Amino acid sequence: MDIAAAREIGAGIAVIALAGVGIGLGNIFSTLVSSIARNPASRPHVFGLGMLGFALTEAIALFALLIAFLILFV
């Protein structure tokens, strides 16, 4: 196997984490909308927690993308 092919396969495997991030973000926002619809008075507290969950989940996506770029270009 050529080193370039191994790099591309490794970067592709590193990006698989983005699928999990997409599923996680979908769960976070569907639960956020559902909870605000059930109890609109709790919106400020629930919205802050939802944004925190979004930021932490999106950080995983950025780390996975960083690893993929490191595999490809370094």
Image: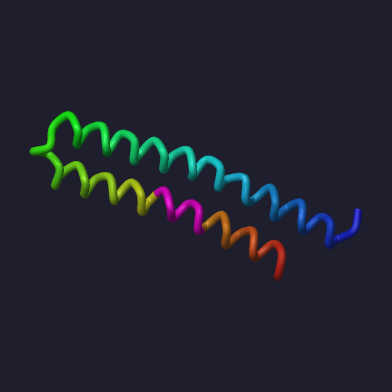
Would residue 16 be found to the left or right of residue 4 on screen? left
Magenta region: which residues? 57-62
Would residue 1 be found to the left or right of residue 19 on screen? right
| x and y, in percent, of residue 4 in the image | 83, 62
Q: Residue at x 76, y 57 (%)?
A: 8
Front one among 43 and 4: 43
Q: Residue at x 27, y 38 (%)?
A: 32
Q: Is residue 42 above or below residue 54?
A: above
Q: Is residue 64 above or below residue 23?
A: below
Residue ranking furthest to the left: 41
- Quarter location, residue 17: top right
Front one among 73 and 43: 43
Residue ranking furthest to the bottom: 74
Q: Residue at x 76, y 51 (%)?
A: 9
Q: How is the image coloured?
A: rainbow
Q: Main secondary structure of the magenta part?
A: helix
Q: Is residue 17 above or below residue 31?
A: below
| x and y, in percent, of residue 20 in the image | 52, 40
Residue ranking furthest to the front: 37
* Quarter of the image that includes the C terminus: bottom right
Residue ranking furthest to the right: 1
Would residue 73 be found to the left or right of residue 46 on screen? right
Front one among 12 and 40: 40
| x and y, in percent, of residue 59 in the image | 44, 55
| x and y, in percent, of residue 49 in the image | 24, 45
Q: Residue at x 84, y 57 (%)?
A: 5
- Quarter location, residue 35: top left
Front one among 43 and 57: 43
Magenta highlight on residue 72: no
